[in-house]
Image (tube, helix red, strand yellow):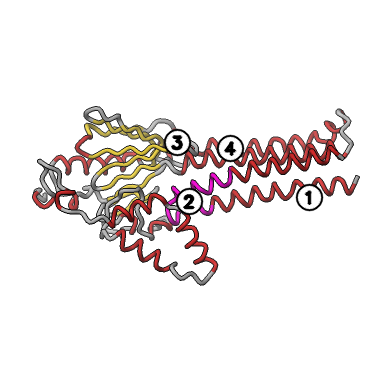
Amino acid sequence: MSQYLFIGLFYILAVGIFAGFSIVLFYHLGKYSMVGDASKRVFAIFMLASLVVIVLAPILILTNNLLS
Amino acid sequence: MIYPRFAYIPQPIFSDQRDTERVFVVARRHFVDFLQSLVILLVMILLPIMVGVIFGSSIMNAVRINEPYWADSVILAAMVYFLILIMVFMTSWVGFYYNLLIVTDERIVEITQRGFFSREIFQLTYDQIEDVDFSSRGLLATYLDVGDIEIQTAGPQRNFYIRKAPKPQLIGAIIHDLEIQTKNRVATSNRMPAGEIIGLIISTPVLRTAKVPPIMNFRGGLNAARRRVMSETKDPKSMRQKFDRWWWTLLKREQVIFLDYQSHEFTKTDEIKEGEKSDREMIDL
């Protein structure tokens, strides 16, 4: 059971660090972007790609545990 | 001629841009400079996927990883790996995208962004320029019209060195024309590149005879245009307007500084330093 706790904590830590990075990035984009440039679009793609990775991981872990 | 979309929204590009300061060039490094990071990212994404597809089962059998816990760890490690890749890529992108060269009728501004926490802004007036050189080396650079521009300065100011600039010959010519006119004491409001192409917005040349994009601020009134954009989203109804309003008010510190700058009422003594002639007194050539 402790191993799953470790996986859960590690997941939360990784996502937390990534969220911190996203906030820093968002701040920079808000501060330095020019209106209408590609910053907003790139940020949207960045969030989409990272959300896919973050959401896919627990789905795969759950599927793996259900199947085995 | 197609301009970047943002070219249609007049706005200050840098913090203390004057209301009447016309912009001739807004350029960032050519995309070819970012291509290396992009290729490395693609390889780093594809490599573990290909290794997993080709050798995955053999590796799992060889190390006898059959328990779900170990498979979970592998999935978690893959997630962290891809998140790190995304973060490294975005850091590299910020370093690429927020490097800007801006040429106006008064000065040259170079904004150098290294990663997230290092941002340097250098300014150079035309009377400080000694010489403008450009060079283009290599097959790709010649083919894509990419090169380096070096602006040698007089006095203690460091030389400007702009790497991988798009259309270096054109940028060099625009700077050279403005420098000559400044040294011939042409009034700021009358300075204009002499060639058929009078500007370069990102990578798009602006022809003398074509419609000038508003970002070049040829009619002045940047502040009025900004107020209009802000008033349009003052009472947001749609989600899009709400988002735009929220984004606009998020920070935009440089633009807030700009508004403060604009609200300051300039007197004649503010604008004309002692011993200098005003633009009105200068001879229009």
* Kind of residue sitting beneath label 3: Ser
Kindly report the distance in space between the C-alpha atoms of the residues bearing marks 1 and 3.
38 Å
Q: Please report the bounds of the magenta region as a residue range.
A: A21-41
Residue at (91%, 44%) from the top-left corner?
A: A68
Residue A25 forms part of the magenta stretch: yes
Q: Nearer the viewer, mark 1 or mark 3?
A: 3
Residue at (49%, 52%) from the top-left corner?
A: A38
What residue is shown with label 4?
B88
Q: Residues within 10 Å of mark 1 (few under 14, many from 20)?
A: few
Kindly report the distance in space between the C-alpha atoms of the residues bearing marks 4 and 1.
25 Å
Q: Is residue B209 left or right of residue B81?
A: left
Kindly report the distance in space between the C-alpha atoms of the residues bearing marks 2 and 1.
33 Å
Q: Is residue B228 above or below residue B187?
A: below
* Kind of residue sitting beneath label 1: Ile
The front one of B46 and B69 is B69
What residue is shown with label 1?
A59
What residue is shown with label 3?
B118
The front one of B138 and B262 is B262
Residue B125's spot in the image, x, y percent?
24, 39
Residue B250's spot in the image, x, y percent?
48, 55
* Kind of residue sitting beneath label 2: Gly
